[in-house]
Amino acid sequence: MTDLLTYDVRTHGCQMNVHDSERLAGLLETAGYVDLASVPVTERPATADVVVFNTCAVRENADNKLYGNLGQLRPAKTSNPDMQIAVGGCLAQKDRATIVQKAPWVDVVFGTHNIGSLPALLDRARHNKRAEVEILESLETFPSTLPTRRDSAYAAWVSISVGCNNTCTFCIVPSLRGKETDRRPGDVLAEIQALVAQGVVEVTLLGQNVNTYGVEFGDRLAFGKLLRACGEIEGLERVRFTSPHPAAFTDDVITAMAETHNVAPSLHMPLQSGSDRVLRAMRRSYRSDRFLGIIDRVRDQIPDAAITTDIIVGFPGETEEDFAQTLRVVEQSRFSSAFTFQYSIRAGTPAATMADQVPKAVVQERFERLVALQDEVSWAENRAIEGRTVEVLVAPSEGRKDLETRRMSGRARDNRLVHFAVPDGAEVARPGDAVSVDVTYGAPHHLVADSGLQGGTYAVRRTPGGDAWAALQDAPVPGKPAVSLGMPSVGRPSTAPTTAPACGI
């Protein structure tokens, strides 16, 4: 058994939480803890000395899932009182002291605005022999200033803003993440340049509403300019972003996407509903015609763009006619895929107390019809790609059947999942390398590219991302980078935005 203090961060929810968990891991490593996964199996304890749950309050049954997981840890805590359990993230921000009341064996509860406090709170709880609950109401330090332990050697998340100024009636995020706060464009670009120097070839820009980026410091066109500035960073091969909001999505962003060589031809554009009446009740400040117009303009400038979306079925008051309008928009939009959700009540949101809650059986039936339609659309869109050559950024593993099918997996530039075969005797790509292959079959949820077995295209291009992954194979967790220092900062620039010439603002 190792004498090292170990940690285990367990993440639920969105990409924001995934990135926050990288920061929590960085903080714990800096404080002297080691990743449980880095301990040899023969010496690894059954449970880490510190287990952190980074929670979500948006997904259905998030609280039940948390308390179920906490219950499973109770015997370990009983047998080892020195073990510590911490709960952070959106559910912690919402429920606060309730967590300790329901699960008194929890040691620390911290919110979305003070993840940097975790090591100190653990020390305080250990010293005081009691649970420590610290929930800040607003952001004091932008999370990107914290040390980070990235999950990938070749791909990285980069936050450009946190919080949201929208007031969607179904969403609890603004009350948990706070008002939108933007980073300075120069700081964002400096972080990306530092990541590229470490071998990163793909970044995903994160914000609750990325296309309102810049409003805080007075430039409504800042996001498009930021995308163009990313195109000037040598060695950066792919730029993605999530998520925009249809109400604020402007044509300058579409043009920036089309004209910037490394911005990926993929777009996640949340629809939520195709009914204008429901959109009004959701307090979504766009209508279906505007949404479809955005889709048309994106495809006009980026014909091969893969567009994905979010859709909620069964919002309070949704009628069969409302749902039919959603099906109509889905058919017209030709989404490559959709994240579909059955509406469920979120305490604290206006929709939770609305009249005309839709019966569960009706929601389920509509949900199944929507999924069937979207599967049909996705399959047709993927079949249309058969015969095309795609460039795949290879992943360590994105296919559960890769071993038995003797394939490798990764993402095409448009973010479609591709499983590809490696010909006998051919060069085997490393994660982070790029492979060009021909699509031989479009399945409903992925592409198959066995062209290398049929005498077709199979070409490996080694990248700095592959080099970075290979250099980390002797790391405690193979392929996982060491802790990197945090980046500066947040808020209105101290001088005019023209101090960031690469961004043009």
Image: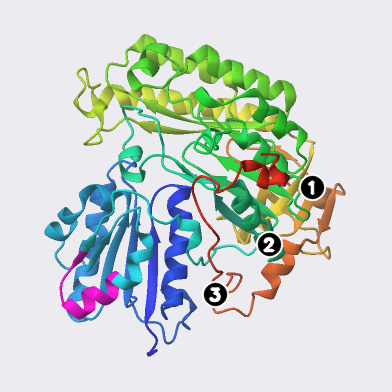
Residue designated by label 2: 431
Q: Residue furthest right?
A: 455
Looking at the rendered image, the disc whose residue lies closer to the viewer, 3 or 1, is 3
Q: Amino acid at mark 2?
A: Pro
Closer to us: 188 or 16: 188
Separation of marks 2 and 3 at Cα, in angstroms: 15 Å
Query: How many residues crowd mark 2 within 10 Å: few (<14), some (14–19), many (20+)?
Result: many
Magenta segment, which residues? 121-132
Question: Could you tell me which quadrant the N terminus lies in?
Answer: bottom left
Residue designated by label 1: 437
Which residue corresponds to the image point at 40% horizontal and 33% vertical from the top-left?
A: 165
Q: Quadrant of residue 117?
A: bottom left
Query: How many residues crowd mark 3 within 10 Å: few (<14), some (14–19), many (20+)?
Result: some
Q: Amino acid at mark 3?
A: Val
Residue designated by label 3: 477
Which residue corresponds to the image point at 59% horizontal and 78% vertical from the top-left?
A: 475
Q: Position of residue 335 (x, y in %)?
A: 58, 27
**Tag count in the figure?**
3
Query: How many residues crowd mark 1 within 10 Å: few (<14), some (14–19), many (20+)?
Result: many
Separation of marks 1 and 2 at Cα, in angstroms: 16 Å
Earlier along the polypeptide chain: callout 1 or callout 2?
2
Residue 393 vs 301, above or below: the answer is below
